[in-house]
Image (cartoon, coloured by chain):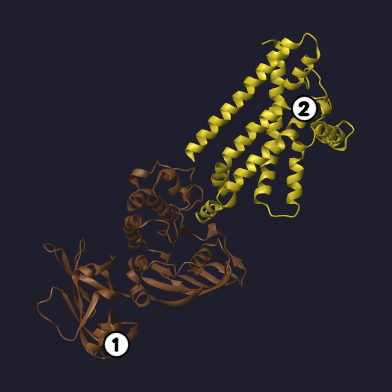
Chain colours: A brown, B yellow
Amino acid sequence: MEVLAVDITGKAGTFAVSARFTAEQGVTALFGRSGAGKSTILKMIAGTARPERGRITAGPRVFFDSDAGINLAPRRRGVGFVFQDGRLFPHLSVRWNLTYARWAGRRAGTRALDEVVALLGLEAHLERYPETLSGGECQRVAIGRALLADPQILLMDEPLSSLDQERRAEILPYLEAVANETRIPVLYVSHDTDEVARLADRVVAIEAGRVRAIGTAAEVLGHGSGKGGGAVSILEGRVIEVDADYGTATIAASGGFIELSAEKLVAGNSVRLRLNAADIAIATAPHDGLSIRNQLRCEVKKIERQGNAVEVRLAFGSEFLLARITAKSADMLRLIEGMQVVALVKAVSIERARNLP
Amino acid sequence: MSEAEIEILLLSAKVALAAMLFSIVPAFAVAWLLARGRFAGKALLQAVVTLPLVLPPVVTGYGLLVLFGSRGPLGRVFESFFDISFAFRWTGAALAAGVMAFPLLVRPIRLSLEAVDRGLEEAASTLGAWSPIVFLTVTLPLALPGLLAGIVLGFAKALGEFGATITFVSNVPGETQTLSLAIYALMQSPEGDAAALRLIGLSIILALGAVVVSEWVARRLERRA
């Protein structure tokens, strides 16, 4: 299995980019605001932009090495690149676009066209031309075209950012399918917390051209902002029971069981959950007679005042939960660090970030 | 049509076709340089290419006579190395037509090359294609409408070229007397009006035909693209 190792400095327009990280099998997100230099780093890996100094390697193969004077041409790097704007060839049908790497790039056909077409749901569109496709369909073709280039590494540059919310929701399951079935490193550039939480195994946070943090989605995104600007926490667990009558499922996480309303969950599967800090309430003791299905025993690790609210970091097993409550509540409950509390989480408020295989 | 008319038509077609055949590749190369090249003297190249369009055709014809005439420096080179002479021959008419049509050929090709999205070429290279293949599979097909427009324009210009041709190779029936020159010759004689009118009608039909065909081809290409 190839491991991508990047250690480069260079320029992205007017500011300097300096990044060092590795990416293994699975999805690594390059996460950060627009204009942080994420796309430039991706282009340097693909070979369409040139770093000033450094080294980029994929397993035994050297893509770029300023000391040794190596700068492999993009076509020799064996990457699949999915561009933000699709970049389908307008004069070629979907079928010819998909197979471009085969007939023009002489890349080996290690994957069957039919398989990729089925994976991305493109069966009905093979003979159509790009201008007749919707934005979402275009991006699916672009993803398929990159997959069929027999890539050793898959690079995706904000593949959803040119689409509206509805189209994104339409494509995300396909990206999830690609992420789950692929055996190569996937680098996914995005500024969207939802996308990253849903797709990424590891997150490299980029800020002003530099790596700010590297870690699991839970570690890095826990500090990031979620919907409505609030913090989010990410938990991983395994589905142990599905109640088909009520449409609920029980997940075993490191700190205990969590119940959520969930469709399409299968017992035995791993799953990643996403909890908004504003949806979590804190009690000092367990309560009866509540509609809230989850009462999670946690320990207060840190209390951070943010204006009239506080953000409470709770240890739940080996993972963390963030709860956002008013400063007044925190004072009335006399919350202090080290205190044992109960986190109250409604089953319906838990979002499924990603189905893992 | 009379035999003489058919001869004039065939000669005109031969001259214009030869002019186009030998101009396409250099015109494409120049258009490529102007669209993509970054070099000193680009403005000068642009000016030289445009020159036949703005100079009086007589001046261009005189220039050709000086350079490519039987005593001209380039004329001698062609004579001794390729055994091609231009003076008072249909080859000279083709050369004059080609030079005069050149700017009309270059401009649409340049514009269409400039309109080709470089991002698509970049995408092709990440898919493993090397630059000649990228050119053949992406750049050329996308620039094709411009290339065809250039060829049609250039062909029409070559077919109707008059000033430079008559200055360079004169008006020799059966050798350099193309459609325009024949019409001119007929108009000089008192009883040639009717015959001139027939040729004028013919050239109008030819021109209309060329425009219709080129529009049709451009439409088809656009629908595909």
Work out whether disc 1 and disc 2 sit on a shared chain. no
Relative to B88, is A13 above or below?
A: below
Instruction: Name the chain letter of the residue that bears numbered label 2.
Output: B
Relative to A218, is B43 above or below?
A: above
Q: Is residue A226 visible?
A: no
Query: How far apart in space, not on screen, are marks 1 and 2 (Cα)?
Result: 92 Å
Q: Residue B93: give its label.
A: 2
Q: Quadrant of the N terminus of chain B?
A: top right
Closer to the observer: label 1 or label 2? 1
Quarter of image, res A313:
bottom left
Relative to B105, A292 lies left or right? left
**Image coordinates for residue B63, horizontal then vertical, percent:** 84, 35
**Image coordinates for residue B219, horizontal then vertical, percent:** 51, 34
Report the front residue among A138 and A34: A34
Quarter of image, res A224:
bottom left
Instruction: Name the chain letter of the residue that bears numbered label 1.
Output: A
Report the front residue among A33 and A219: A33
**Image coordinates for residue A345, horizontal then vertical, percent:** 21, 75
Q: Which residue is mark 1?
A: A301
The disc labelled 1 sits on which kind of residue?
Answer: Lys
Quarter of image, res A218:
bottom left
Relative to A327, is A152 above or below?
A: above
Q: Is residue A129 visible?
A: yes
Report the front residue among B78 and A158: A158
